[in-house]
Amino acid sequence: MTWGYREQRRTYYNQEWHTYGFEWNEEYLWTYIDSRVAQVISLRFKESFWKKGNFPTTITNTTTGEIQRLTNPWISSENNVAPFDQRMSPFHYIIVDDTDNVAFYLILNLAVGATNGWFPDGEGGKPWIDNSGTAMTDFWAAKDRWWNNWPSDKKERGFAIDSVKMWKTC
């Protein structure tokens, strides 16, 4: 739904500081690296996120086997921007203050691996199975298979952030 990537030419991202931009308004959201011209994601709100996500009508709880009906949590929104319409959201990390403004928080992280199907089971020597209850333990137990691919210099393999700046446009 909302992912993208941009490769560097003749260099790597860890060799210098970069500006990672994110712009969001009632019509679109988009991201860029170093320049607004170098877009990574450009997403116009032409349809609802529920429709864009092509969510199934039911899911099966893998623990109990129970079939559960999925319903659109943003059905009462009057536009295609929900949950980013700053008026309603089912997410627990969004706080509404006494002025009825919604605070959204920027989360910066570096993730390795996943259990959401992004890395298919059985491909590329992946040492865990997505549905396993011990996926994180399996990943770490297999570190002898992947650790030597990581640079020994912490500056080359680290996730360094020089600063974070946010502005509100009026």
Image (cartoon, rainbow, N blue to C red):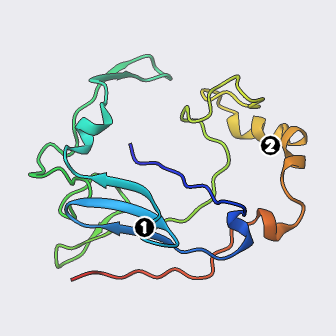
Q: In the image, residue 28 lies at what x, y percent?
A: 26, 59
Residue visible at 19% across and 47% down in the picture: 46
Visible residue check, residue 141: yes
Q: Which residue matches tag 1? A: 37
Indicate which label's residue lies in the foreground, 2 or 1.
1
Q: Mark 2 packing: few (<14 Cα in 10 Å), some, or many (20+)?
A: some
In this view of the protein, can residue 105 be seen by the observer? no
Left or right of residue 80, residue 55 in this image: right
Q: Is residue 138 left or right of residue 41?
A: right
| 52 in relation to 101, above or below | above
Q: Quadrant of residue 154?
A: bottom right
Residue at horizontal 54 percent and vertical 35 percent from the top = 116
The quarter of the image holding the N terminus is top left
Neighbour class for label 1 at 10 Å: few (<14), some, many (≥20)? few
User: At 86% across and 58% down in the image, what residue appears?
Assistant: 151
Mark 2 and mark 1 lie on one chain; the one further toward the N terminus is 1
Quarter assignment of residue 86: bottom left
Which type of secondary structure does the marked residue at label 2 adopt? helix
Q: Image point 22% across, 33% down: which residue?
A: 71
Q: Where does residue 29 sit, x and y in percent of width and height?
A: 32, 60
Give the quarter of the image for residue 41. bottom left
- The span from disc 2 to disc 1 (Cα, nearest Å) is 39 Å
Name the mark on residue 140.
2
Type of amino acid under label 1: Val
